[in-house]
Image: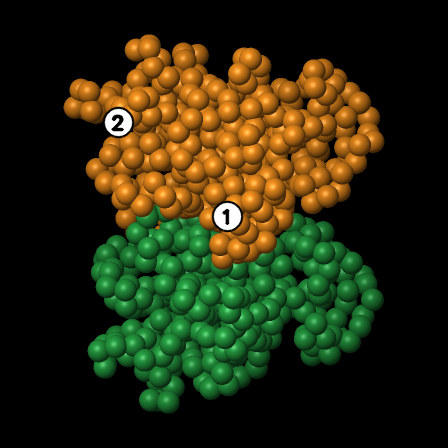
Chain colours: A green, B orange
Amino acid sequence: MILASYPDGRDGAACIVAPDRATARLLGRSFAEVIEGLVTTEGDVRPFDPQACTAPLPRARQFLDGSAYVNHVELVRRARGARMPESFWTDPLMYQGCADPFLGPTAPIKGDPDWGIDLEAEVAIVTGDVPMGADVDTARAAIRWVMLLNDVSLRNLIPPELAKGFGFVQSKPPSALAPLARSVDDVPGWDGDRLQARMCIDLNGQPFGRLDAGADMTFGFPQLIAHAAKTRPLPAGTVIGSGTVSNKLDGGAGRTIVSGGAGYGCIAEQRMVETIETGAPVTPFLRSGDHVEIWMEDSDGRDLFGRISQKVETL
Amino acid sequence: MILASYPDGRDGAACIVAPDRATARLLGRSFAEVIEGLVTTEGDVRPFDPQACTAPLPRARQFLDGSAYVNHVELVRRARGARMPESFWTDPLMYQGCADPFLGPTAPIKGDPDWGIDLEAEVAIVTGDVPMGADVDTARAAIRWVMLLNDVSLRNLIPPELAKGFGFVQSKPPSALAPLARSVDDVPGWDGDRLQARMCIDLNGQPFGRLDAGADMTFGFPQLIAHAAKTRPLPAGTVIGSGTVSNKLDGGAGRTIVSGGAGYGCIAEQRMVETIETGAPVTPFLRSGDHVEIWMEDSDGRDLFGRISQKVETL
């Protein structure tokens, strides 16, 4: 099942999109209600307009964002002069982020350019109810939907905020979602733990990342869910993020697409590699008017979730 | 206006409680809906049963917990061997916590005793919609409701989790709320920024804390809201916590009530003072069967929010 939402109040009006995406059946309720079990299959069928979509889930019950591509964590830490403990390869890193709002796929990214605005291309899943203390198998069975997410990050706010010890609040503003959510039984490449698909990022119309989302994801989603549920139940409608997709490329730092590499899932990684290679970062963080596009393709090159297409508006 | 909720689905069934608390008018909707503007004043009036109440807001849109009693932060950091930066007196500390569920006032605290289960007695407010970048005056005008909250904390999970740098997830399980939420125009002692009232905590029937919630709160709620809203809008129904109420007592560490002091808002503080005085903590964290009671009183000794009364059930 492919689900999208048109703007309507705080939760949006959900529709079931036909496989050919030409039409959609309006459900007369929100995706949040569908997640909580109020499924309707009756409703008017209309031409589907992806341009008119907001986020499939304009507000979620909870957003817990992992950092499962540990290669990314290591590079970003190096970029800010911090070392990564070895335990990060075995114990998932996770923070609780902004779940309300989730921005629509074409909403502007608003911020002060001095904040160091960056994108982070992530896979996200939506859970059903997960009991506290759930094991990995229980967690796997609770995964309902897969989505594509841009976890906007404010790089210059992160070091001072994390130094305070309580994690991210100001440095992680609302994320954006691609227009389509897909049920786990529908999305090509879903293997129960990871999405085997290509993460594509363009920046100002130029290829920035063409990454393998299934490789190098140290922790699968069931492990992330079990980590999150150790001391709390997760309500239906919890969104779990993968963290920035990042490829190790035979153990070394990545390369830009122009240099024949797979590129990056965020600007911070490219700046880190530039620092390693030239002594200083070259690529700036996002500035007014910059255009970020993120989409995913299955192994046959077919689009999976529609496209995140956000322009930056500075304050 | 005094508002309470009876168990009903995920959001509860809200009622407006009469000032004498003898009766309540059933609204036929949830507190979450009331917060979003769907106020009804018509409904059946029934005898009010505080024992049957769940949390007034069984699930919130977002929970951002400040640590506004900086004295508490300093003591807890000392208790785990960490120093507090001077900037903590001017830049609020805040993390994003579990907003779904909020436990009812008599729900058990469930956990592994090895986790180091602690209570934290906090004042909490509920906001209306707050725009991104709101200043302190805008933030103050957006405060709608005041509540009483037990922010359960798992002390033995905190040092390793915070060492990872992303803040709390596992070490902050669901919090509990006292049965009554009160609108800011109704609650005695609300001065627009802080609640001038007495925070009372009993542990196993013995007085544990009798604290002045209005004193020593370094950052008022409008400052906490403005901090939270710097890079995101806050949706109506956001809960902002004060952090553990803590009194400085002429600049020194607190004293137990038996020793003539005001006691503590959490066990960790008492253990810290014991460590200072005797070289080691004496008071254990919570164990199976322990009974935590938290309530607040206005300057005339009248109860404000009803009582949190939780027993510990170990896993």
Does residue A292 lie above or below B148 as drawn?
A: below
Element assignment for label 1? helix
Residue A154 lies in what quarter of the image?
bottom left
Please state which of residues A31 and B134 is positioned toward the viewer in this rendering.
B134
Q: Indicate the position of residue B19 as horizontal and vertical percent values.
A: 70, 19
Residue A104 lies in what quarter of the image?
bottom right
Q: How many marks?
A: 2
Which residue corresponds to mark 1? B226
Q: Is residue A287 left or right of residue B46?
A: left
Q: CA distance from mark 1 to mark 2?
A: 31 Å
Q: Residue at x 44, y 74 (%)?
A: A286
Q: Is residue A234 visible?
A: no
Which three-letter amino acid code belongs to the residue tagged 2? Met
Q: Residue at x 34, y 32 (%)?
A: B72
Q: Indicate the position of residue A16 as horizontal and vertical percent values.
A: 71, 66
Which three-letter amino acid code belongs to the residue tagged 1? Ala
Whichever of callouts 1 and 2 sits on the residue coming sooner in the sequence is 1
From the image, state whether disc 1 or disc 2 is nearer to you: 1
Element assignment for label 2? helix
Density class for disc 1 (Cα within 10 Å; few <14, some 14-19, many ≥20) is: many
Q: Chain of mark 1?
A: B
Density class for disc 2 (Cα within 10 Å; few <14, some 14-19, many ≥20) is: many
Q: Indicate the position of residue A42 as horizontal and vertical percent values.
A: 81, 61
Q: Is residue B270 left or right of residue B128?
A: left
Residue found farthest to the left = B279
- Which label is found at residue B272? 2
